[in-house]
Image (tube, rainbow, N blue to C red):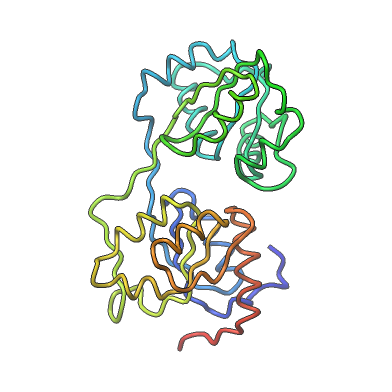
Amino acid sequence: MDTSIENNLAALKILVTRPQHQADNFCHLLATAGARPERFATLEIHGPADKHRVNALLDQLDSYDLAIFISPNAVIAALTLLRARGENFPQALARAAIGPATAAALRESGLPASLIAASGADSESLLAEPTLQDMHGLRVIIFRGRGGRALLGDMLRERGATTDYAEVYQRVSPQNKTLQLGPGSGHEDLDLITVTSAEGLQNLYDMTDAALRPLLLDIPLAVGGQRIAAAARQLGFNKIAVVAEKPTDEAMLTAILAWAKRVEKTPHE
């Protein structure tokens, strides 16, 4: 962390909604920049919903020409499942990553990506890469969470590939957990809420009591991309203050710092 930005967030109280196991670095970055991060995970990451289907795909992993990883969670979950089988990821199988965070997860696992989108961190960015334009005769396995967008698989099939989704994890809304707002709630006087997925945003809304949603919708929101911003508008959020280029910790921090500088927010006493 560049010490020149220390205290630039002037003790702003910022709610972090990342899954619990992924929040440490972001909270550290925010705190180093002078903020007061508060954790409220709106997603939990669980194992695959259909383990038999995933294992059937892993049985034929050597037959694929390209493996695409949608997220850091996809990297971690896929390698965890392989280790449980007593296997390693085939070094010869080409690997593509959507976004720098996913590429970093692969690199840290000793499996550097051979293809990363030149810009952006979504399916559209990866699909724009020249090497993915003609996919005739190639088999592609896409590691992702349960559900999600169909764009990547659909477009690769249109370009001639055979594709399979290996849904190696599932995102689950935390049970018996509600967001309390207002005086005495422990989350009063929030300056900003950070959200890095549309599903996490929906869960945040659902985990807030209907009587408190007007308070929630009036808190400034920092989101990790335009798609999440659009989802926030549909839900009725009034103050989409920050739209980061990517949902990575670093991109979110950069965008929040720029916003804080613009508004020159006075910290709460």
Query: Which part of the image, by quadrant, shows the C terminus?
Result: bottom left
- Residue drawn at (42%, 36%), measured in percent from left and top? 147
- Residue 218, image quadrant: bottom left
**Residue 257, x across and y down, in percent:** 63, 71
Left or right? Give the position of 219 relative to 186: right
In the rendered view, tell whether residue 58 sits above or below residue 42.
Answer: above
**Residue 39, x across and y down, in percent:** 41, 62
Task: Report the front residue among 6 and 181.
Answer: 181
- Residue drawn at (32%, 74%), measured in percent from left and top? 214
In the rendered view, tell whether residue 149 sits above or below residue 158.
Answer: below
- Residue drawn at (37%, 37%), measured in percent from left and top? 46
**Residue 115, x across and y down, in percent:** 71, 32
- Residue drawn at (64%, 43%), measured in percent from left and top? 99
Q: How many marks?
A: 0
**Residue 166, x across and y down, in percent:** 47, 25
Left or right? Give the position of 42 relative to 223: left
Query: Which part of the image, by quadrant, shows the N terminus?
Result: bottom right
In the rendered view, tell whether residue 157 sits above or below residue 74.
Answer: above
Task: Report the front residue among 144 and 89.
Answer: 144
Task: Report the front residue among 42 and 106.
Answer: 42
